[in-house]
Image (spheres, rainbow, N blue to C red):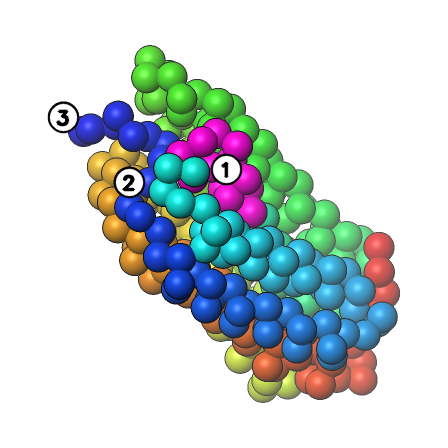
Amino acid sequence: MIDLSNYPYATYEPNQIAAGILAGVIGISLIGWLAQATRKFRRLIILLTISHVTIFIELVLRAALSSSERKSRASFTATSVLLAVGQRTIILANYDYIVRVGEVKPAITRCVIIGPILIALTSAALMIPAGMLSYNKSTIPQSFALRQASAAIVLGLTILFYPIWFALKTWKDMKKQSIIRLLISSIACLSVAIYLQITSVPDYYITTSHEEYWFYIFQFTPMAIALLTWTFLHPRRSLQADVNTSEL
């Protein structure tokens, strides 16, 4: 029998020092990202700025709030939303970038951009009732079912990125630096999506909620690697002259 008495809260005591240090790392990455920003890529800039900011705020809250303070609906909801937004905006940035290179028809560009946004919003919408149902013992199974559906949608979105990228053939027009950046970012998003799919299963959710290192290794680290990659391999320095810089 699985002990769900603490669901949906984590039972570990947050390492406030580690969270503070890592918040500093993300903050530095954010400064570097914005320092290289250009108006030509404003949607991409906005998406990854949002990702930086949301993950930074989550780490600040992790450093500032005690374990007891985190076990409130308000703080749990806030941190969950921040992490969800941080992950999804990186995924959307990956999709946004692949239609900026080469000759992609405007209609296809809109589909590639708007489609993932709608899918990401759908997965986020499922987490609202999942969160509401998690506080009632009689509806916990339904909460996990919705959590699993939401995680599956995000996982599908990260996997779908590769055949779409291949079908568009924009990788042929990309510089090596751009391909490396997209591969690192997309693989990081995929690894987080797989982790979240696994932890949407009750047994694994409870197991990972006992130790904080699960979060840092399989959720924070991949997202941090993706953001740092975007900052250090900034698209401003690698986009070719024939990039499609039109906005919706």
- Mark earlier in primary sequence (2, 3): 3
The percent position of residue 190, horizontal first and vertical second, equals 44, 58
Circles 2 and 1 in contact, beta carbons < 8 Å: no
The label number, if any, that marks residue 40 in the structure image: none
Q: Which residue is mark 1?
A: 75
Q: Is residue 95 left or right of residue 223?
A: right
The percent position of residue 2, horizontal first and vertical second, equals 18, 29
Q: Amino acid at mark 1?
A: Ser
Quadrant into which the C terminus falls:
bottom right
Mark pair 2, 1: CA separation? 14 Å
In the rendered image, is residue 43 in sight?
A: yes
**Numbered range of the magenta stretch:** 70-82
79 inside magenta stretch: yes
The image quarter in which residue 122 lies:
top right
The label number, if any, that marks residue 11 in the structure image: 2
Q: Does dot 1 land on a helix, a strand or a loop?
A: helix
Binning the other alpha carbons within 10 Å of mark 3 as few (below 14), some (14 to 19) or many (20 upward) gives few
Q: Is residue 242 left or right of residue 13?
A: right
Residue under the point 80% across and 64% down: 42
Q: Amino acid at mark 3?
A: Met
- Mark earlier in primary sequence (1, 3): 3
Q: Amino acid at mark 2?
A: Thr
158 inside magenta stretch: no
Q: Does dot 3 land on a helix, a strand or a loop?
A: loop
Q: Does dot 2 land on a helix, a strand or a loop?
A: loop
Residue under the point 84% across and 71% down: 40
The percent position of residue 75, horizontal first and vertical second, equals 50, 37
Q: Which residue is mark 3?
A: 1
Mark pair 1, 3: CA separation? 28 Å
Q: Nearer the viewer, residue 121 or 27?
A: 27
Quadrant into which the N terminus falls:
top left
The percent position of residue 110, horizontal first and vertical second, equals 77, 52
